[in-house]
Amino acid sequence: MTQRLTYHLESINSLNDRQHGFREGKSVDTAINELLSKIQTARRDGKHVLVLSIDIKGAFDNLQHRAILKNIQTQDLETKATGWSIYPSEHLEPNQISLEDGEANIVRKDIINIFLDDSKTEHGIGAAFCVLTNDILAYQWSAKLNDNNTVFQAELTALHEAVLYATHLPNNNTSKIHVDNRASIMATFNSKSTNETARKIFKILLTNPRIAVWWVKAHAGNIGNEIADQLAKNATQLGHPYSLIKLPKPHIKGLLRKSMLEEWQTSWKNGDTGRKIYNIMPSVSVPLTGLERMLSSLNMALSLPTSKT
């Protein structure tokens, strides 16, 4: 393809002899070597050498950096925490965190069981938790997060709210918070977690050893887990808006991708070239489909003459 492109440009006298880059034998290295050779030759002949370096990459850079930066700055994006959240010598009690199935502890009558869940549907993202005392629903909480938040953020939000609730219970009560996502528990247990919400949960657990977080198998017929699951689903439509969680960084990628596709579509729609292909493929998309790849290759092949043998 490079050879055919070079042949096409040379045949219409559009490729200068000093052209470097994609032309075969004219790489950046050869350009630098050619410049150094000219300098050495001039010095050997006793001539003065004036070298002028011009950076013209900006002329070919179509990225609107200011617009991108402005878009990023207007978004309240989640940032990564660094360092230790506490002194390295401080840690949670061994029985406060468990990645084993905590189903056996649910039947105990001396424990307040708290179940939480998250849900993502076409209506949005919801988070919820419920409190069971002797298998009786004693309290429930739910909220609707921003549609651009992630399910992991929703899970940690529900866990944070559940931990806060447990801190207000009488000191003689032991609370077990049941989570069906091990990743959330692992983030909470890690004192060097880069997630701000996970760090907040860790600090609360550190000062409240009577609160424990245990893993429980999802959709195993447990009534508390099923109630939390339904509350989270309902919250995607009816939940109170929860705005305390910042948007994840991948969200900005989606915005930039959308802006790029819109600009690309406008340019493709209003362009003067490739109209036959446009009639077949009027909409741009990323990644290209098999048909789009074939048409693009065909369009390139038809536009470049082949060499005569």
Image (tube, grey):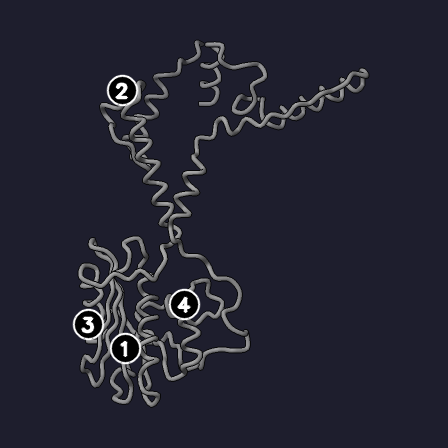
Point out the image quarter for the N terminus.
top left
Q: Is residue 238 above or below residue 295?
A: below
Residue at left offset 58%, top offset 22%: 26
Query: Mark 2–mark 1 contact, CB under 8 Å?
Result: no
Circle 3/circle 1 CB separation < 8 Å: no
Q: Residue at x 66, y 23 (%)?
A: 52
- Could you say whether the residue bearing mark 4 is in a helix, strand or loop? helix
User: Secondary structure under badge 2?
Assistant: helix
Whichever of labels 2 and 1 marks the residue nearer the N terminus, that label is 1
Image coordinates for residue 42, horizontal then vertical, percent: 76, 17
Q: For the residue carrying disc 3, how many other residues have a C-alpha within 10 Å: few (<14), some (14-19), or many (20+)?
A: many
Labelled pair 4, 3 in contact (Cβ < 8 Å): no
The residue pinned by badge 1 equals 114
Distance CA(mark 2)–CA(mark 1): 62 Å
Measured in 3D between alpha carbons, the distance from the residue under mark 4 to the one under mark 1, in whole angstroms, is 18 Å
Circles 2 and 3: CB atoms closer than 8 Å:
no
Horizontally, residue 255 falls left or right of residue 144, namely: right
Tell me residue 83's x, y (percent). 53, 65
Q: Which residue is mark 3?
A: 227
Type of amino acid at the residue the image marks with label 3: Ile
Q: CA distance from mark 4 to mark 3?
A: 24 Å
- Residue behind mark 4: 198
Badge number at residue 275: 2
Question: Which is more N-terminal, label 2 or label 4?
Answer: 4
In whole angstroms, how far apart are the C-alphas of marks 2 and 3? 56 Å
Which sits in the foreground, 14 or 305?
14
**How many residues crowd mark 1 within 10 Å: few (<14), some (14–19), many (20+)?**
many
